[in-house]
Image: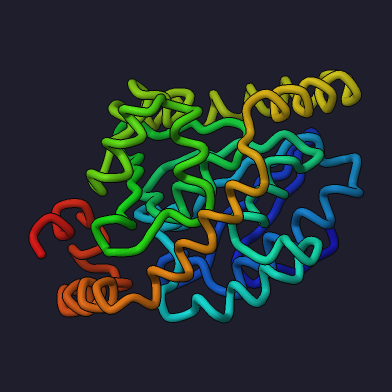
Amino acid sequence: MKVTFKSMTTELKAGVLWVSIDNPPMNLIDEKFVQDLITLLDETQKDDKCRVIVFRSSDPDFFIPHVDMNKIAEYTAVAATSGGPDDISLGALYRRLSESRPVTIAMLEGRARGAGGEFLYACDMRFASLEHGVIGQPEIGVGVYPGAGAIQHLVRLCGRGNAMEVILGSDDWNAQEAERIGLINRAIPQNELLPFVTALAERIAKFPEAAVRLAKRRINAAGLPPKEDVQVDSGFFQILARDDSSAARIAALNERGFQTRSRAELEFGDVLGEI
């Protein structure tokens, strides 16, 4: 792939494109990441050498912690360039990820929360480090709303009651708990995770593409939410992100080191329960 990215690095091997998210200081979603994801989807859609994409992180602590709350307008404006006139949100861009030509696998070795968790759910499969994988949907505790697909995906992945617990509880879930309720496919010991994902990705990449693409399309038809519902959720996020109650909660988090490599991010679920 002859493209230079600002927030990720890529390597194509045996039909598998390995994408390492690398957006210092801690892989927050900003306009650079959104633009790179759009470019990646554009390029892999037309590159038949790329059969499977594996997403991982170059940061051992953070896969994608959440969006940069100071860059909502900027990344939303970039996301609006990805699709049609009605596809103007991060949720719509994630829908493109779900419907992409290659099979997509997320390999979680750190923390994925908020829109980082929603990125995981948009991928076709999710495998996490048993020791280090953490998933959380903290939006309600912050006073905002899961606007990029969490509500739609979690009801389908783990059922109504578990979706309520994850979203309304706004707490962190370790990999073992996430596997138990269906947030991820498997929690795998750290020393076995890369060999397992490599073997699976290369196995799929060897199979006839027409059969893989048709199966993916029909599974998506049965399992993905309607686009209209994702857009509704995106609108709710934009509304609550400007609400006074969320501003007060974010201010309290900022005092504790929000959006820095601090306990506020490393133990977000615990800190959120303290404010």
The residue shown at (59%, 47%) is 229
Residue 160 lies in what quarter of the image? Answer: top left
Where residue 97 appears, as percent x and y from the top left, is 69, 47
Q: Nearer the viewer, residue 110 or 102?
A: 102
| Farthest residue, direction left | 274
Give the quadrant of the C terminus.
bottom left
**Is 270 on the left-hand or right-hand side of 131?**
left
Taking the image as drawn, is residue 188 in sight?
A: no
Q: Is residue 265 left or right of residue 236?
A: left
Q: Is residue 47 above or below residue 252?
A: above
Q: Residue at x 33, y 57 (%)?
A: 139
Residue 251: x and y, percent? 22, 79
Q: Pinpoint residue 20: horizontal percent, then vertical percent.
A: 58, 53
Indicate left or right for 254 with 95 as reference.
left
**What residue sits 68% from the left and 66% below the top?**
88
Kindly identify the residue that appears in the image at 39 percent across and 77 percent down: 242
Q: Quadrant of residue 216?
A: top right
Residue 213: which quarter of the image?
top right
- Count numbered badges in the picture: 0
Q: Nearer the viewer, residue 224 or 105?
A: 224
The reply, left or right, for residue 88 in relation to residue 48 is: left
Q: Is residue 156 visible?
A: yes
What is the image's colouring? rainbow
In terms of depth relative to the viewer, which is nearer, 73 or 39? Answer: 73
Q: Quadrant of the N terminus?
A: bottom right
Q: Is residue 190 above or below residue 141?
A: above
